[in-house]
């Protein structure tokens, strides 16, 4: 049984806010020796708490001006084939199976409304097993993961990693 402590959560907080932060800079911010930071990060990787390091892309600079979420209801018998078909659409950035009024939520990134229409109507809408869709165009978003890690830190929650 592996428990995460205050220093583990502080490391996660710093990495979520800036995965490119150097270990010496993190060491100064947290007030812990660099060797401790290195060993803690290695432990968090080994435990699978840190799955990967990544970057955040400014999609607008790549011409992606519209992000949308499409709620999808599907025939339960077609679950896997619908998933496989949606997975092949290049504008799809995330597929989530959910509870509630939809069976799936699919995130899409496109250049313009015409492309959004094409993806929703001509690609998703024509997949066998899709019963209906509802599209939500994103007006604004905020990444709140840093605040979430801070919340865990402030609660001093005993987190056990299995």
Image: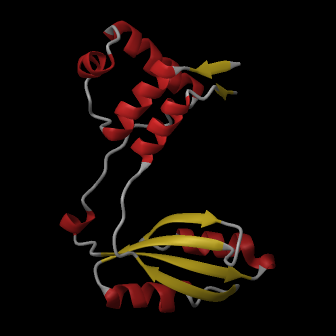
The residue lying furthest to the front in this view is: 155
Near-viewer residue (161 or 126):
161
The image quadrant where one finds the N terminus is top right
Q: Where is residue 117 in the image (x, y as percent from the top left)?
A: 41, 90
Left or right: residue 142 versus residue 81 is left
- Where residue 63 sits, quadrant-wise, is bottom left
Q: Residue at x 29, y 84 (%)?
A: 112
Q: Is residue 15 above or below residue 54?
A: above
Left or right: residue 81 versus residue 9 is right
Left or right: residue 162 versus residue 4 is right
Q: Where is residue 160 in the image (x, y as percent from the top left)?
A: 66, 26
The image quadrant where one finds the C terminus is top right
Near-viewer residue (137 or 38):
137
Q: In this view, does 33 lie above or below 63?
A: above
Left or right: residue 74 versus residue 122 is right
Near-viewer residue (88 or 143):
143
Q: Residue at x 27, y 21 (%)?
A: 29
Q: Position of residue 70 (x, y in %)?
A: 52, 78
Q: Residue at x 36, y 59 (%)?
A: 142
The residue lying furthest to the right in this view is: 77
Which color scheme did the rendering employ for the protein?
A: secondary structure
The residue lying furthest to the left in this view is: 61
Q: Position of residue 48 (x, y in %)?
A: 57, 31
Q: Is residue 152 above or below residue 3?
A: below
Q: Which residue is drawn at 26% across and 30% down?
A: 21
The tally of labels here is: 0
């Amino acid at each position: 049984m592996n428990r995460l402590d205050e220093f583990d959560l502080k490391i996660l907080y710093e990495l979520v806010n800036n995965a490119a932060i150097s270990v010496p800079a993190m060491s100064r911010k947290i007030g812990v020796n660099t060797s401790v930071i290195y060993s803690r990060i290695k432990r968090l990787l080994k435990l699978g708490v840190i799955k990967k390091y990544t970057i955040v892309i400014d999609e607008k600079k790549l011409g992606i001006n519209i992000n949308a979420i499409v709620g999808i209801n599907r025939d339960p018998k077609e679950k896997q084939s619908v998933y496989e078909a949606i997975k092949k659409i290049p504008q799809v950035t995330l597929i989530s199976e959910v509870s509630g009024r939809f069976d799936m939520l699919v995130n899409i990134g496109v250049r313009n409304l015409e492309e959004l229409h094409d993806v929703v109507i001509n690609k998703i809408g024509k997949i066998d097993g899709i019963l209906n869709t509802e599209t939500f165009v994103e007006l604004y978003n905020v990444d709140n993961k840093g605040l979430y890690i801070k919340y865990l830190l402030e609660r001093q929650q005993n987190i056990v990693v299995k």
